[in-house]
Amino acid sequence: MPRIPPKPLLEHTPLAPYLDALGALGVEADTWLVKERDGADATIRVHGPRGTVEWACERRARLDRATLGALLQRMHEMRGRFQRTLLLTEHVTPPIADELRAHGIAFVDQAGNAFLRDEGLYIWVTRRPRKRTAPITRRALHAAGLKLVFVLLRQQAHVRTLREFAAEAGIALGGVARILRELERRGWTRKLRDGVELHDPEAMLKRWEEGYAETLRPKLFLGACRRRPGTTLEDLPRAIANTRAPQKIAIGGELGAALLTGRLQPTTAALHLDGLEPIEVMRELQLLPDPHGDVFLLRAWGRPPREGAKGPTDAAFADPLLVHGELLLHPDDRLRDVARVVKAEHITPRWK
């Protein structure tokens, strides 16, 4: 079948600032809108003395350290599908620019900070201040929207009505219909008579990864602790199993990933508490408050799953979506490799 040329972008589109920034750096480029091309947001053509090459683009409205791990995971996945990948974002600070360059991630922002390296091309510009732009309006996907995205990505078969969605996500019933309309407007879901169908779970997972790190986790975080001397993280599952309510403490983070995959030596653990007081959990597990500790306590929400995999001592695992989100909090290659395994073995099979 002959390839249909993509539709040219007009000057007033949101990608115009990046083309302008490239032009100011002496790079002649144009682009087309690509709605479906293995998940790329757009394709930019760069013209030079060695010919014209295409860069598959990932757009991020904002970029900060909390979401850097998820971004590196995304760009790594794109490299498996495209020869050249380019990050487009509003502004890249010097420390993050250094980190992106260290990982070989090409980028350009609206201020003209950029890193591009290709045959016959090398650009490295940083420390340009942020440009003043109109504030970005983000609808429906703050904390409540992210919780509902989490429920949809889990694909719980029994969830059918708005009331069931609200109970599962732990959000107000009045907001469910509005959030579902927003998800449908984005082309991510479609409402059916007996539930919701996912049209673009990959896009939803991408937003979940960003939103968990940036918005949801800070609201759920209860504190960090250290273990008593002589104990290891691997001792936690047995200690949890001996508490008064072991099924209300779900193991996530690196320890959860290690239990799920057997491919990680954990250095931290995240414990999701379902209605338990942190001080009581700390007392039972002999944990002490420590902002630099390796055990993180987080509040569970909604209706945590009661079924699924259990640890070797009957301690519950956190949902793989939470495990995956915790692994991407840091730009660590070791954790990103395990995150890919968690996604492939425990998340994407749910959507088939």
Image: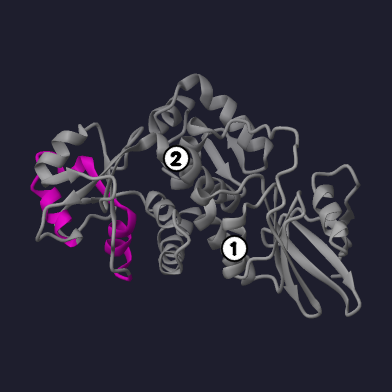
Looking at the rendering, which quadrant does residue 171 occupy?
top left
As rendered, which of 1 and 342 lies closer to the eye? 342
| Mark 2 neighbour density, 10 Å: few (under 14) some (14–19) many (20 or more) | many
Q: Position of residue 10 (x, y in %)?
A: 91, 47
The amino acid on which the numbered mark 1 sits, given as a three-letter code, is: Asp
Is label 2 in a helix, a strand or a loop?
A: helix
Residue 6 shows in this picture: no
Instruction: Name the N-terminal-most of marks 1 and 2.
Output: 1
**Up-down relation of residue 260 to residue 111 (above or below):** below
Find out whether residue 241 is within the magenta segment.
yes
- 291 left or right, relative to 81: left
**Up-down relation of residue 241 to residue 281 (above or below):** below
Which residue appears at 48% of the width and 36% of the height? 148
Tally of numbered discs: 2
Q: Position of residue 204 (x, y in %)?
A: 56, 47
* Start-end of magenta stretch: 234-263
Q: Position of residue 3 (x, y in %)?
A: 86, 67
Which residue appears at 8% of the width and 48% of the height? 242
Q: Main secondary structure of the magenta part?
A: helix
The residue singled out by tag 1 in the image is 98
The residue singled out by tag 2 in the image is 151
Q: Any mark on residue 139, and which?
A: none
Which residue appears at 69% of the width and 70% of the height? 82
